[in-house]
Image (spheres, rainbow, N blue to C red):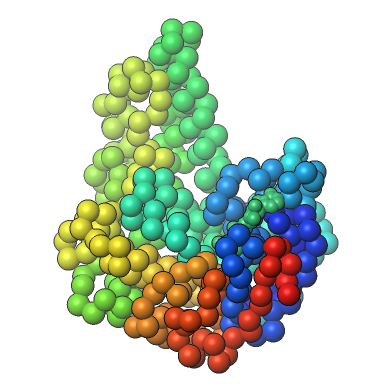
Amino acid sequence: MFLRQLQLQKFRNYTQQTVTFDGAKTIVLGANAQGKSNLLEAIQLLASLKSFRVYRDRDLVQWGQTGGEIIGSCEKRYSPVELSVKLYANQRRTLVVNGVVVKKKDEFLGNLNAVLFSTLDLELIRGSPEYRRDWLDGVLVQLEPIYINLHQAYQQVLRQRNALLKGIRLGKIPYDREQMELWNTQLVTIGSKIILRRRRLIDRLQPLAQKWHQLISTSENLCLTYLTRFPCNDNIPAIQAAFSDHLQLRSVAEQQQGTSLVGPHRDDVQWQINNQLAKEYGSQGQQRTLVLALKLAELELIEQVIGEPPLLLLDDVLAELDLQRQRALLEAVQSSTQTIITTTHLDGFAGQWLDSAQVLTIVAGKLQ
Ligand SMILES: Nc1ncnc2c1ncn2[C@@H]1O[C@H](COP(=O)(O)OP(=O)(O)O)[C@@H](O)[C@H]1O
Ligand SMILES: [Mg+2]
């Protein structure tokens, strides 16, 4: 797939800007705080409906404005598609596909796929489990947009169950076993589907990440493991049974703490390099290598499933990689894969990139 044109209106520090991409490789050049990451953020939003930096739309809308818009014109193998996200400081977004407003996220998602790699991704190794869960969920949404519905349904059940547990803890709501069991059933039913999908995703990413990791780092061995609070086999009945049992086990603790302690919202992913935890053992360079391998695995898997390469968005990371890793990236990324790279300077880039790339210079939210 190819993003031909991007229009930004009152988005971050862009008042009104059209960006046309000529070829598969684009370098976005600019000093700090000019709007390079904002540009990638806008593209990532069209692909995932999430910003990689903030949660609230009001942070995305230009300061002092009530609303803004991102419009993307994409070329896909079978048909072109025009996507628009209208963002507001004080109301819900509007999503538009080919001129038609769509009500559900799953109708919008899947039209554009993108893999973003930024310096924040080191949190995948060092950060809290939430980063790793969010990454898995983000990949799943790209592979299968209806996953978003499962995710939203789980969040809703979790919120309500947590409110109930909190009420019980504060003595405002009496404990009612039957009521709790109804919530448990919902949590287990939806949660088990999420766990199964995430585990299968890890199984699919494992060989790809391992391959890329070995290519970049030569002999090291990489192992990805999905961690649940309870051991169980890899099928729905087994997960449901173990999940339910564990809920019973933790029932008193949940009432005391007033929150849900078991389920996919508490799961994690573990990365091991040569049987050691990457979090504890990895140097900054090794952790970067690992993140790169994970992102390349993501790229390859999405391409396998979708049948077209997603966009690759590299925010300030390429020049940070040494030439060997840059070359690995070049090999990984087919020449046809649209790649948009931001950087503050062009030195440090392998010659192949510079020869084939369109260079766009950004100053204070304007293309020069
Ligand atoms: N909602 C907003 N409205 C206007 N400007 C914003 C908004 N959010 C961020 N900015 C500005 O955008 C700039 C940062 O852009 P960014 O893309 O992160 O820079 P960089 O080029 O370093 O990647 C800063 O100058 C910041 O003040
Ligand atoms: Mg930036």
Q: Quadrant of residue 46?
A: bottom right
Above or below — where is 351 with respect to 215? below
Number of numbered markers: 0
Residue 311 visible here: no
Q: Residue at x 54, y 72 (%)?
A: 343
**Residue 103 placement (x, y as % from top left):** 74, 48
- Left or right? Give the position of 28 relative to 137: right
Residue at 44% x, 34% y is 187
In the displayed structure, 260 sits above or below 210; it is above
Depth check, front residue: 27 or 81:
27
Q: Nearer the viewer, residue 203 or 349?
A: 349
Residue at the spot 43% in from the left edge and 59% down from the top edge: 121
Looking at the figure, which quarter contains the N terminus? bottom right
Location of residue 68 in the rendering, given as x and y in whole percent from the top left corner: 77, 52
Location of residue 323 (image quadrant): bottom left
In-front residue for pair 156/6: 6
Q: Where's residue 223, x and y in %?
A: 25, 63
Query: Where's residue 306, x and y in %?
Result: 55, 72
Furthest residue toward left? 275
Along the line of sight, the residue nearer the viewer: 110 or 274: 274
Q: Tell me where residue 326 sits by quadrant.
A: bottom left
Q: Please report the residue visible at 73 percent of the width from the left and 75 percent of the height from the top.
A: 368
